[in-house]
Amino acid sequence: MNSFKKNLLKKRYNAERRFQWYGKIAIGLALSFLAVFMFQIFSKGYSAFQKTWIVTEVHYDKELLLIDAESPSKDDLENADYYDVAYKAMTSLDTGLPEEEDRQLIQMVSYKYEAEVKDLLLKNPDFLGKIVPIKLTASDDVDQVHKGNYPRDIPEKNRRVNDYQLQIYDMLNERGDILSEFNISFFTSPDSREAELAGIASSFMGTVFSILVCLAFSFPVAVLAAIYLEEFAPKNKFTDFIEVNINNLAAVPSIVFGLLGLGVLLAVFNLPRSTPLVGGITLSLMTLPTIIIAARASLKAVPPSIREAALAMGASNMQTTMHHTVPLSMPGTLSGTIIGLAQALGETAPLILIGMVAFVNTIPGTPVDPAASLPVQIYIWSESAERGFVEKVSACIMVLLAFLILMNLAAQIVRHKFEKKWS
Amino acid sequence: MNLILVTFIILLAFTSYYFGRKKALVIQSSQRLTALPKFYGYYLAAWCAAPALIIFALWSVFEPSIVKTFILQDYTDQNLTKNELQLIYTKVKALAAGTYTGNITNFLDESANKYIQLKGIANSAKVAIILAILIFSLSFAYRSVQKNDRMREPVEIFLKWVLFVASLGAVLVTIGIVFSLLFEAIRFFQAVKIFDFIFGTHWYPAKTFVRDGQPDPELMKDAFGAVPLFAGTFFIAFIAMCVAIPIGLLSGIYLSEYAGRGIRKYAKPIIEILAGIPTVVYGFFAALTVGPFVKEIGNAMGLQVSAESALAAGAVMGVMIIPFISSLSDDVMTAVPQNLRDGSYAMGATKSETVKKVIFPAALPGIVGSILLAVSRAVGETMIVVMASGLAANLTMNPLESTSTITAQIVVILIGDQQFGDPKTQSAFALGISLFIVTLLLNVIALSVVKKYREKYE
């Protein structure tokens, strides 16, 4: 072999190796995008599962509460005036402060601190007249300082927490009066304008209702349509038209379904705006083609011998389908349905168009109450400027992703556990 | 009221099922049945529920508009516009429901009374008609049962019709989309010339906002030029494809030609996770991490970069689209027959030469199809752009500036309260229909390309 040929061979082998490396790098890049992404979300979001409390002492002074009765009833406690008591509880942290500066201390807890003071007494009526320790929700800024998300070294005028508040914070922290506990209220409270109080309960319920409505509308129609197309439809132009239609519908951008919801469901049928009912119907139109395609595929996978055996026993076409083909195809259909619902779960744009972005600070109890949904909540919070919402968004994303992972796992389990393998 | 009626019909259907079956068992004692007993039940139940529910649905759809025409008849002599009439009707309804808080004029009061009266008449008429239909259809069905007619065929034909109607659902959705978009878009094009919309280079719909009266036609002419949006949409999609095509295609090639079974089994689903993450999450990621990162790098190189750049949005969108290309191209390359590969190896080609010169060209139609599907996905993507690429429609080809897209503008226009009949709101539907047409075309082409390709090797 002469040297020219040797060189050529070497070149070709080098090219081969290079090409393989391109492929590896491409896969590596795709996987590292996913890793970076997950890391970002988790590193930003995990702190939202911790809630910061400020511990102080409250004196349930009867006089300040304006309670006259000797042994006050529940109503008396309910109607008492907690403003001064709560105010004192916070200002007692630094008695040396001039009165006009009191607001600086008050700003360190959430604006609902008065309600928290009230709730403690209502739960423990015997605290009346006593001095007891109380946990108050720290304000969003103190919360962020405590979690180390807030830079302390920038100039004071650019900071939302001033030097005095930092000093008080440090003092409390040294005394051990800043508590960090698991943030239950993130899961149980509705949305709020204040980051420290905001929770996902309202949007979570909104999501649950939308998905249920979506399931109720899309599943029956899709399964029936799939049965017709796969088992009964005659081969003609009209059937072809329906099939082309379904395939194209599966690729229509989701926002167009939002326009449909707005233009038809809200404007023509006058359904209530901003509700999971309308959101669910809109999403069901979107998932319809997904489920039809999955159901058809799993109907097709049922071997013809099953049908032939049933027909040979004298069953009618309808009986064959309903008693044998459809039950055998159910695992595939169900897992396709779950995957379709998981897609619907992550949709945001159509829900924004039908008004599910309204600020909702109550937990919806029915599908016709105004609500947001988890992805929309992510959008709402990420548009908001407060620093505390960044970790809330990440935490909300974690909840949403957990939901999606669970649904996809469920789909896998349904498919592998119940599906019959025909060989 | 409606709920009670529907529950009544459904309960009656259930009862008639049991009644029918029982009747069949009675018949069985004297003569041979022509079908299984349960079909007698189904037959009765279907006759009970179907006609009544269909009439009920039709009634519910048409009643409001009929009542509305009756009420607004009294106002025809006042020369009111459509919107004013709508407003009056809303007031009348609120007054009738007792939730109206504005001024009550005699005329309004009269209308509200008339409304309540009409509603009452309509309700009793509805109940009467439905009861009549129930009695009629049940007695008809019962006679068939008594005669011991063949019961299975009609029930199965009925079921078949139910299945057929369900399959029309998908068609109905398409019709709904087309009509809801067209209806508003046509009204938009009555106010704004279609030529100005397609070729105008200035998009600034907020300019046309007027509280009272008609917007100035001169302003309208200059405010709804959609060229910046079309350009922005395809520009961002182009950036996304610059990220997604090389990475997706090379991953696809590696997965189908080089990777062992183990790697393929795990790598493919993991990459597909990228497509399963909700787009709003990508939007947040793009706005909070990638956008500032791009800006920092740009500033370090002495470039003017806006925090909401087309580059950030496009790049993140590209990452989202990778699996669409990698998985589909993996599939089409795996489908290339093995004898093509064997032929190439036999001629002494290396693996990469085989991929580049034989498999890739053979799979090209399928790959083009997958890329077109990915482009259509990128064009229709909304949340990433809304959150990461600004909302001002700049006509620019600079990836470091912010641009807007069709989808983002639809969201911007329609977020919050909309007023129907306003050209700004209608413009969103005009944008929607252009988006629908573009994605539809891309899909039809992609699907037909992929289908042709499949036929070639099957």
Image (cartoon, coloured by chain):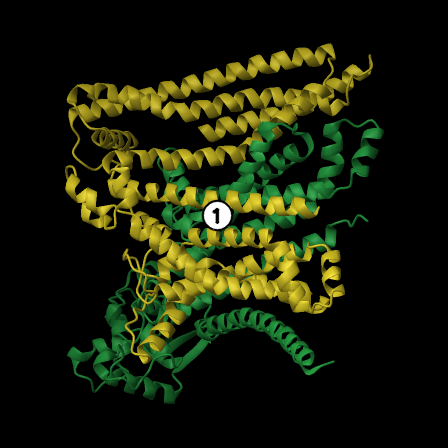
Chain colours: A green, B yellow
Say whether residue B197 is visible: yes
Please state which of residues A176 and B122 is positioned toward the viewer in this rendering.
B122
* Picture residue at 46% right of the left edge, 73% below the top: A40
Please give the chain letter of the residue carrying mark 1: A
Q: What residue is shown at x 57% (from left), y 46% (from top)?
A: B449
| Residue A177 percent across, percent down from the top left | 38, 83
| Residue tagged 1 | A210
Residue located 65% across and 29% down the image: A233
Query: Which residue lies at the image location 74% right of the left edge and 50% below the top edge?
Result: A419
Q: Quadrant of residue A329?
A: top right
Quarter of the image where one finds residue B25: top right
Q: Is residue B87 left or right of residue B25?
A: left
Q: For residue B405, what is the image quadrant?
A: bottom left
Is B39 placed left or right of A220 in the picture?
Answer: right
Q: Which percent across, then down, holds residue A341?
A: 55, 50
Amino acid residing under circle 1: Ser
Q: Is residue A195 left or right of residue B281?
A: left
